[in-house]
Image: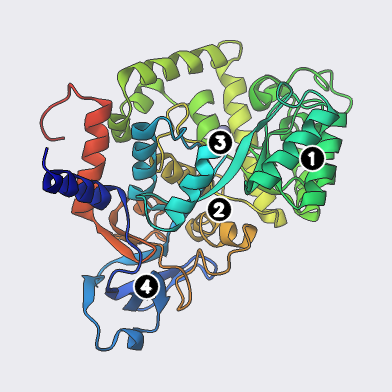
Amino acid sequence: MSAHCIRSILLGLLLVTSLAHGQGAVRIDDVRVVDPDAGSASWPRSIAVLDGWIVDPDALDGRDVRVIDGSGRWLIPGLYEMHAHVPPVADAERLDDVLTLFLAHGVTGIRGMLGERGHLELRAELAAGQRFGPYLVTSGPSLNGTSAPDPTAARRIVRTQAEAGYDLLKLHPGLMPSTFAALTEAADGLGIPYAGHVSIGVGLDRALAAGQSTIDHLDGYAQALVPDDHPARGRPPGFFGMALAEALDAGRIPALADRTRAAGVWNVPTQTLIENIAIADLDALAARPAMRYVDDETVTGWRERITGLRQPHSATALERFVDVRRALIRGLHTAGAGLLLGADAPQIFNVPGDSTHHELELLVAAGLSPAEALATGTVNPARFLGQPARGCLRAGCVADAVLLDADPLADISNVRRIRGVLRAGSWLDRADLDARLDAVAARARPAATGPD
Ligand SMILES: [Zn+2]
């Protein structure tokens, strides 16, 4: 193979896998700009982008500008997925597919909830635009009853992960109260946040008292919704409290929500994961268009997993479980406790990006307005992460945005109608996104042929 040939292959690879930041200027004209905080969209105007940042349109004077027609369209800040799973870097193809799926669905920022060493370098590559994908914030490897069986082990892991430079610690089940206490004390001392599950032995009260930065999956709330004198109090909760469905007292929600707000603890409900597992029609899940990105073996495995999880419970109990969780989401929101958008993908019928859209729909089903749901995936994560230049579309904000063909404030499902994505100022149009998505689908289902 000639040197020229190798060079062109390398150049080609660079073009498909990277996003050069700030190459040229972009202007989207006549677009309605959505402000999730205000719950409104602007009159049609121009949004100007230079070197990856949103700027005043005058700043583009005299430059070679790529102009995008925004007429009849809406622009939202790029979405954050706050409970993502990033494949190991050793699984390079799968990793690229997951990153592509997120970005092509308008997810321009993700919080990886099961990190590894390789994700630290990946985070830098994504931030520098050397790789195609969203902006990444990452946890370290899981802290759980096995990896952190005692306080000494927990302190050691906390120190190692803080020194390595992870953004947060991921908590998983099985931690003992003494281990949790040691962990939180060490983490607070080093200034590294901790987030994720609430171990059964730890319980919601300790998680709130410690100021755990996020509780994911609403873990621990079901146990706290069982009245003190109920025989189910203290019983094994099953999958996120599914086994307690009949004992849940929704009357306890307002007080719990107030305590959550007072503790400054945010929630990432991942309601779509729970509804997939508890009540969704399995054939309908398998028939979702996004399943073209998932191989048959995985779909079969997901079906079996759901069937097993549902098996001990009645349909009535499962429906009640979902209803109370929706009431809890609504109650947390009403109380002013912070909510963050997160679906938990790729897991159990949750395809990266597509499941983020499902989560938005379920937040609206739970009682949030479309604008409030959008806020959980834009301005709220920016506030939570302390990044005032993200999740916004003013001059001075990072140019991460999604151009939609229809109004998301009228119907949240319109977030699916993506015309193009801006990632750090690079414009990805529909044809580019489709080509990348088709490649992911072809890898998942190589046997499938023809257009779809
Ligand atoms: Zn997870």
Query: What's the amino acid at mark 2?
Result: Leu
Task: Say left or right for 84 vs 69.
Answer: right
x and y, in percent, of residue 133 in the image: 38, 49
Q: Earlier in the sequence, mark 1 or mark 4?
A: 4
Image depth: mark 1 or mark 3 in front: 3
In the rendering, which numbered label is found on residue 207? 1
Marks 1 and 4, Cα distance to the nearest angstrom? 42 Å
* Residue receiving disc 4: 51
Give the CA distance from mark 4 to mark 3: 31 Å
Q: Is 67 left, or right, of 288 in this rendering?
A: left
On screen, residue 215 versus residue 388, left or right, reads: right
Q: CA distance from mark 1 to mark 2?
A: 25 Å
The residue singled out by tag 3 in the image is 116
**Location of residue 146 (image quadrant):** top right
Nearest-to-viewer mark from 1 and 4: 4
**Are circles 1 and 2 on residues that touch, CB within 8 Å?**
no
The structure residue drawn at horizontal position 86% and vertical position 37%, both measured from the top left corner, is: 181
Closer to us: mark 3 or mark 2?
Answer: 3
Mark 3 belongs to which amino acid?
A: Glu
Residue 121, visible in the rendered structure: yes
Residue 259 visible to the viewer = no
Residue underneath mark 2: 368
